[in-house]
Protein backbone atom coordinates (compact mmCIF):
# COMPACT_ATOMS: atom_id res chain seq x y z
CA UNK A 1 0.00 0.00 0.00
CA UNK A 2 1.27 3.51 -0.86
CA UNK A 3 2.17 5.52 2.26
CA UNK A 4 -0.10 8.49 2.96
CA UNK A 5 1.68 11.74 3.77
CA UNK A 6 0.14 14.63 5.65
CA UNK A 7 2.33 17.73 5.61
CA UNK A 8 -0.52 20.23 5.95
CA UNK A 9 0.23 22.81 8.65
CA UNK A 10 3.72 21.47 9.38
CA UNK A 11 6.62 23.71 10.28
CA UNK A 12 10.01 23.06 8.66
CA UNK A 13 12.58 23.77 11.36
CA UNK A 14 15.34 21.15 11.42
CA UNK A 15 17.21 18.87 9.06
CA UNK A 16 16.14 15.88 11.14
CA UNK A 17 12.37 16.30 11.27
CA UNK A 18 11.56 14.06 8.30
CA UNK A 19 11.56 10.32 7.73
CA UNK A 20 13.30 8.95 4.63
CA UNK A 21 9.91 8.24 3.07
CA UNK A 22 8.85 11.84 3.66
CA UNK A 23 12.12 13.14 2.21
CA UNK A 24 11.63 11.00 -0.91
CA UNK A 25 8.06 12.28 -1.22
CA UNK A 26 9.26 15.91 -1.02
CA UNK A 27 11.92 15.22 -3.68
CA UNK A 28 9.43 13.41 -5.93
CA UNK A 29 7.06 16.38 -5.60
CA UNK A 30 9.90 18.77 -6.50
CA UNK A 31 10.69 16.65 -9.54
CA UNK A 32 7.08 16.93 -10.72
CA UNK A 33 7.18 20.71 -10.24
CA UNK A 34 10.45 20.89 -12.16
CA UNK A 35 8.81 19.09 -15.10
CA UNK A 36 5.71 21.28 -14.93
CA UNK A 37 7.74 24.52 -14.89
CA UNK A 38 9.97 23.34 -17.72
CA UNK A 39 6.89 22.42 -19.80
CA UNK A 40 5.77 26.06 -19.52
CA UNK A 41 2.67 25.35 -17.44
CA UNK A 42 1.17 28.30 -15.54
CA UNK A 43 0.69 26.56 -12.19
CA UNK A 44 -2.22 27.63 -9.98
CA UNK A 45 -1.96 25.13 -7.12
CA UNK A 46 -1.73 27.86 -4.45
CA UNK A 47 -3.94 30.42 -6.16
CA UNK A 48 -5.44 32.83 -3.60
CA UNK A 49 -2.76 32.15 -0.99
CA UNK A 50 -0.31 34.66 0.43
CA UNK A 51 3.17 33.82 1.76
CA UNK A 52 5.48 36.18 3.68
CA UNK A 53 9.25 36.19 3.45
CA UNK A 54 10.89 37.69 6.54
CA UNK A 55 14.67 37.91 6.20
CA UNK A 56 16.43 39.49 9.16
CA UNK A 57 19.79 38.50 7.66
CA UNK A 58 21.09 38.92 4.08
CA UNK A 59 20.19 36.31 1.48
CA UNK A 60 20.11 36.00 -2.28
CA UNK A 61 19.27 32.36 -3.06
CA UNK A 62 16.93 31.48 -0.21
CA UNK A 63 14.97 34.73 -0.40
CA UNK A 64 14.71 34.92 -4.18
CA UNK A 65 14.15 31.21 -4.80
CA UNK A 66 11.34 31.27 -2.22
CA UNK A 67 9.88 34.38 -3.83
CA UNK A 68 10.13 32.69 -7.24
CA UNK A 69 8.66 29.46 -5.88
CA UNK A 70 5.74 31.30 -4.25
CA UNK A 71 4.85 32.96 -7.55
CA UNK A 72 5.53 29.81 -9.59
CA UNK A 73 2.92 27.85 -7.57
CA UNK A 74 0.36 30.61 -8.14
CA UNK A 75 0.49 32.26 -4.71
CA UNK A 76 1.33 35.88 -3.93
CA UNK A 77 4.17 37.07 -1.74
CA UNK A 78 4.90 39.89 0.67
CA UNK A 79 8.50 40.58 1.66
CA UNK A 80 9.53 42.45 4.79
CA UNK A 81 12.42 44.14 2.99
CA UNK A 82 15.49 45.28 4.85
CA UNK A 83 15.45 46.81 8.32
CA UNK A 84 15.48 50.39 7.04
CA UNK A 85 12.03 50.06 5.43
CA UNK A 86 10.25 48.19 8.24
CA UNK A 87 9.49 49.00 11.87
CA UNK A 88 12.68 47.16 12.75
CA UNK A 89 14.15 50.64 12.33
CA UNK A 90 11.93 51.82 15.22
CA UNK A 91 13.11 49.01 17.49
CA UNK A 92 10.28 46.50 17.02
CA UNK A 93 11.28 42.98 18.04
CA UNK A 94 11.29 40.26 15.38
CA UNK A 95 8.79 38.37 17.52
CA UNK A 96 6.26 41.25 17.30
CA UNK A 97 6.89 41.61 13.56
CA UNK A 98 6.25 37.90 13.11
CA UNK A 99 3.07 37.95 15.24
CA UNK A 100 1.75 40.79 13.12
CA UNK A 101 2.58 39.30 9.72
CA UNK A 102 1.21 35.89 10.76
CA UNK A 103 -2.24 37.47 10.71
CA UNK A 104 -1.87 38.51 7.07
CA UNK A 105 -0.68 35.33 5.37
CA UNK A 106 -1.04 31.56 4.93
CA UNK A 107 2.64 30.61 5.45
CA UNK A 108 5.88 32.30 6.50
CA UNK A 109 9.51 31.86 5.50
CA UNK A 110 11.93 33.35 8.01
CA UNK A 111 15.69 33.76 8.30
CA UNK A 112 17.22 35.16 11.47
CA UNK A 113 20.84 35.34 12.73
CA UNK A 114 19.92 33.97 16.16
CA UNK A 115 20.41 30.21 16.64
CA UNK A 116 17.12 28.74 17.83
CA UNK A 117 14.99 31.62 16.53
CA UNK A 118 13.17 29.27 14.16
CA UNK A 119 11.97 27.11 17.05
CA UNK A 120 10.66 30.17 18.87
CA UNK A 121 9.09 31.49 15.66
CA UNK A 122 7.24 28.24 15.04
CA UNK A 123 5.75 28.50 18.54
CA UNK A 124 4.59 32.05 17.86
CA UNK A 125 3.17 31.61 14.35
CA UNK A 126 -0.19 29.95 13.77
CA UNK A 127 0.63 29.33 10.12
CA UNK A 128 3.37 27.00 8.82
CA UNK A 129 6.82 28.42 9.55
CA UNK A 130 9.65 27.50 7.21
CA UNK A 131 13.15 28.06 8.56
CA UNK A 132 15.30 29.84 5.96
CA UNK A 133 18.34 29.57 8.25
CA UNK A 134 18.63 30.34 11.98
CA UNK A 135 22.14 31.56 12.75
CA UNK A 136 24.74 28.81 12.66
CA UNK A 137 22.20 26.16 13.72
CA UNK A 138 20.07 24.77 10.85
CA UNK A 139 19.15 25.45 7.21
CA UNK A 140 16.76 22.60 6.41
CA UNK A 141 15.45 23.79 3.03
CA UNK A 142 19.06 24.03 1.83
CA UNK A 143 19.68 20.44 2.95
CA UNK A 144 16.50 19.35 1.15
CA UNK A 145 17.64 20.92 -2.10
CA UNK A 146 21.08 19.40 -1.51
CA UNK A 147 19.74 15.85 -1.37
CA UNK A 148 17.53 16.58 -4.38
CA UNK A 149 20.69 17.69 -6.20
CA UNK A 150 22.69 14.63 -5.11
CA UNK A 151 19.92 12.35 -6.39
CA UNK A 152 19.74 14.22 -9.71
CA UNK A 153 23.50 14.53 -10.25
CA UNK A 154 24.56 11.02 -9.20
CA UNK A 155 21.39 9.05 -9.93
CA UNK A 156 21.01 7.81 -6.37
CA UNK A 157 21.14 8.75 -2.70
CA UNK A 158 22.84 6.43 -0.22
CA UNK A 159 25.97 4.32 0.03
CA UNK A 160 28.13 7.23 -1.12
CA UNK A 161 31.06 8.98 0.55
CA UNK A 162 30.72 12.73 0.98
CA UNK A 163 33.43 15.09 2.20
CA UNK A 164 32.29 18.24 3.98
CA UNK A 165 35.07 20.77 3.43
CA UNK A 166 35.63 24.16 5.04
CA UNK A 167 33.76 25.85 7.87
CA UNK A 168 31.93 23.01 9.59
CA UNK A 169 31.64 24.87 12.89
CA UNK A 170 29.45 27.75 11.77
CA UNK A 171 28.12 26.24 8.50
CA UNK A 172 24.44 25.61 9.18
CA UNK A 173 23.99 23.91 5.81
CA UNK A 174 26.29 21.04 6.76
CA UNK A 175 24.64 20.82 10.19
CA UNK A 176 21.34 20.05 8.44
CA UNK A 177 22.74 17.96 5.60
CA UNK A 178 24.71 15.72 7.98
CA UNK A 179 21.45 14.31 9.35
CA UNK A 180 20.11 13.49 5.88
CA UNK A 181 23.41 11.84 4.93
CA UNK A 182 23.21 9.69 8.04
CA UNK A 183 19.57 8.80 7.33
CA UNK A 184 20.42 7.63 3.82
CA UNK A 185 23.50 5.65 4.91
CA UNK A 186 26.21 7.83 3.41
CA UNK A 187 29.72 7.88 4.85
CA UNK A 188 30.90 11.37 5.85
CA UNK A 189 34.42 12.78 5.96
CA UNK A 190 34.70 16.07 7.85
CA UNK A 191 37.71 18.04 6.51
CA UNK A 192 38.33 21.38 8.17
CA UNK A 193 40.92 23.41 10.03
CA UNK A 194 40.99 22.45 13.72
CA UNK A 195 39.30 25.77 14.65
CA UNK A 196 36.34 25.07 12.33
CA UNK A 197 35.56 21.44 13.19
CA UNK A 198 32.00 20.16 13.19
CA UNK A 199 30.50 20.84 16.66
CA UNK A 200 31.15 17.84 18.89
CA UNK A 201 27.48 17.50 19.85
CA UNK A 202 26.48 17.08 16.19
CA UNK A 203 29.25 14.59 15.41
CA UNK A 204 28.33 12.59 18.52
CA UNK A 205 24.63 12.61 17.73
CA UNK A 206 25.28 11.47 14.15
CA UNK A 207 27.60 8.69 15.36
CA UNK A 208 25.05 7.64 17.98
CA UNK A 209 22.51 7.31 15.17
CA UNK A 210 24.95 5.00 13.37
CA UNK A 211 26.75 7.35 10.97
CA UNK A 212 30.22 6.43 9.72
CA UNK A 213 32.30 9.60 10.15
CA UNK A 214 35.98 10.40 9.71
CA UNK A 215 37.55 13.70 10.75
CA UNK A 216 40.69 14.84 8.95
CA UNK A 217 42.81 17.76 7.84
CA UNK A 218 44.16 15.77 4.84
CA UNK A 219 41.98 17.16 2.06
CA UNK A 220 43.76 15.40 -0.83
CA UNK A 221 43.21 12.00 0.75
CA UNK A 222 39.57 12.83 1.56
CA UNK A 223 38.89 13.94 -2.01
CA UNK A 224 40.54 10.82 -3.45
CA UNK A 225 37.96 8.67 -1.62
CA UNK A 226 34.83 10.79 -2.08
CA UNK A 227 31.95 10.64 -4.53
CA UNK A 228 30.81 14.12 -3.50
CA UNK A 229 32.58 17.11 -1.97
CA UNK A 230 30.43 19.74 -0.27
CA UNK A 231 32.44 22.94 0.12
CA UNK A 232 31.39 25.69 2.54
CA UNK A 233 32.38 29.32 2.87
CA UNK A 234 34.31 30.49 5.91
CA UNK A 235 31.64 32.83 7.24
CA UNK A 236 33.16 36.09 8.39
CA UNK A 237 29.85 37.21 9.92
CA UNK A 238 29.77 34.34 12.45
CA UNK A 239 33.23 34.89 13.97
CA UNK A 240 33.55 36.63 17.35
CA UNK A 241 36.25 38.96 15.96
CA UNK A 242 38.14 39.78 12.75
CA UNK A 243 41.42 38.24 13.99
CA UNK A 244 39.85 34.79 14.45
CA UNK A 245 38.43 35.02 10.93
CA UNK A 246 41.74 36.13 9.40
CA UNK A 247 43.49 33.18 11.07
CA UNK A 248 41.48 30.59 9.11
CA UNK A 249 40.15 32.31 5.98
CA UNK A 250 41.38 30.73 2.77
CA UNK A 251 42.43 27.55 4.63
CA UNK A 252 41.21 25.32 1.82
CA UNK A 253 40.76 26.45 -1.75
CA UNK A 254 39.44 23.94 -4.27
CA UNK A 255 41.25 24.76 -7.52
CA UNK A 256 42.14 22.57 -10.50
CA UNK A 257 45.39 21.48 -8.84
CA UNK A 258 43.58 20.20 -5.73
CA UNK A 259 40.81 18.74 -7.89
CA UNK A 260 43.43 16.61 -9.68
CA UNK A 261 43.70 14.52 -6.47
CA UNK A 262 39.95 13.84 -6.39
CA UNK A 263 38.20 10.60 -7.29
CA UNK A 264 37.27 10.53 -10.98
CA UNK A 265 33.77 11.92 -11.56
CA UNK A 266 33.47 13.58 -8.15
CA UNK A 267 30.43 15.86 -7.78
CA UNK A 268 31.26 19.30 -6.36
CA UNK A 269 28.59 21.09 -4.35
CA UNK A 270 28.48 24.39 -2.47
CA UNK A 271 25.43 26.13 -0.94
CA UNK A 272 26.79 29.49 -2.22
CA UNK A 273 27.61 32.32 -1.92
CA UNK A 274 31.28 31.51 -2.45
CA UNK A 275 34.09 33.91 -1.76
CA UNK A 276 37.33 32.20 -2.83
CA UNK A 277 36.96 28.62 -1.56
CA UNK A 278 36.23 27.28 -5.05
CA UNK A 279 38.39 28.82 -7.77
CA UNK A 280 36.42 30.11 -10.77
CA UNK A 281 38.50 27.82 -13.03
CA UNK A 282 36.68 24.84 -11.45
CA UNK A 283 33.30 26.07 -12.77
CA UNK A 284 33.96 24.49 -16.17
CA UNK A 285 34.47 21.00 -14.65
CA UNK A 286 31.36 19.01 -15.59
CA UNK A 287 30.81 17.74 -12.05
CA UNK A 288 30.71 21.30 -10.68
CA UNK A 289 27.06 21.23 -9.63
CA UNK A 290 26.75 24.32 -7.42
CA UNK A 291 24.81 26.58 -9.77
CA UNK A 292 22.50 23.71 -10.80
CA UNK A 293 22.14 23.09 -7.04
CA UNK A 294 21.00 26.70 -6.51
CA UNK A 295 18.48 26.38 -9.35
CA UNK A 296 17.07 23.18 -7.83
CA UNK A 297 16.16 25.22 -4.76
CA UNK A 298 13.19 26.77 -6.49
CA UNK A 299 11.56 23.42 -7.37
CA UNK A 300 12.20 22.02 -3.93
CA UNK A 301 10.70 25.10 -2.28
CA UNK A 302 7.65 24.92 -4.58
CA UNK A 303 7.12 21.37 -3.31
CA UNK A 304 7.44 22.42 0.34
CA UNK A 305 4.97 25.28 -0.09
CA UNK A 306 2.45 23.02 -1.79
CA UNK A 307 2.79 20.39 0.90
CA UNK A 308 2.69 22.55 4.06
CA UNK A 309 -0.30 24.54 2.80
CA UNK A 310 -2.11 21.29 2.03
CA UNK A 311 -2.83 22.33 -1.56
CA UNK A 312 -1.14 19.26 -3.05
N1 LIG B 1 22.63 29.02 0.25
C1 LIG B 1 22.09 30.13 0.80
O1 LIG B 1 21.42 30.06 1.84
O2 LIG B 1 22.33 31.27 0.11
P1 LIG B 1 21.79 32.71 0.51
O3 LIG B 1 22.46 33.09 1.80
O4 LIG B 1 22.15 33.59 -0.63
O5 LIG B 1 20.31 32.59 0.73
Image (tube, helix red, strand yellow):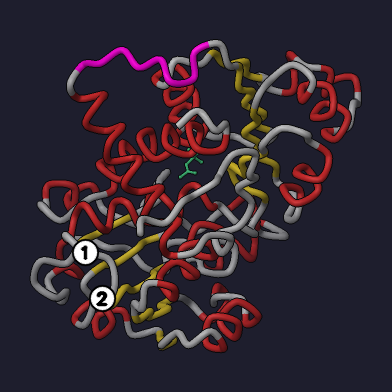
Q: Residue at x 65, y 80 (%)?
A: 201
Q: Quadrant of residue 33?
A: top left
Q: Farthest residue toward the front?
A: 1
CB at disc 1 and ligand 1 closer than 8 Å: no
Where is residue 114? Give x, y as percent: 75, 50
Q: Residue at x 73, y 13 (%)?
A: 85
Q: Nearer the viewer, residue 6 or 288?
A: 6
Q: Is residue 256 magenta?
A: no
Residue tagged 2: 160
Disc 1 on helix, strand or loop?
A: loop
Q: Nearer the viewer, mark 1 or mark 2?
A: 1
Crowding around mark 1 (Cα neighbors within 10 Å: few <14, some 14 to 19, many 20+) is few
Q: Quadrant of residue 123?
A: top right
Crowding around mark 2 (Cα neighbors within 10 Å: few <14, some 14 to 19, many 20+) is some
Q: Is residue 144 left or right of residue 246?
A: left
Asked if residue 83 is positioned above or below residue 262 in the image, the reply reads: above
Disc 2 on helix, strand or loop?
A: loop
Q: Is residue 185 visible?
A: yes
Asked if residue 22 is positioned above or below residue 182 in the image, the reply reads: above
Residue tagged 1: 156
Asked if residue 168 is positioned above or below residue 108 in the image, the reply reads: below
Q: Quadrant of the C terminus?
A: top left
Where is residue 170? Give x, y as percent: 59, 62
Amino acid sequence: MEPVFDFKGRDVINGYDFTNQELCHIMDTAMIYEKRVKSGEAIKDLEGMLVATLFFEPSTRTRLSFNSAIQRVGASTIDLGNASVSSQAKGETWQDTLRTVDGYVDAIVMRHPEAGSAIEAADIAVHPLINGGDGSRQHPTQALLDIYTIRKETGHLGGQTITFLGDLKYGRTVHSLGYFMQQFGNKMIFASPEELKMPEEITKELRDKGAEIEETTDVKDALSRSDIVYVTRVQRERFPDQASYEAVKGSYILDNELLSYAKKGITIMHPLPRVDEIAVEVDSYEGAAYFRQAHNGMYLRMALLGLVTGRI
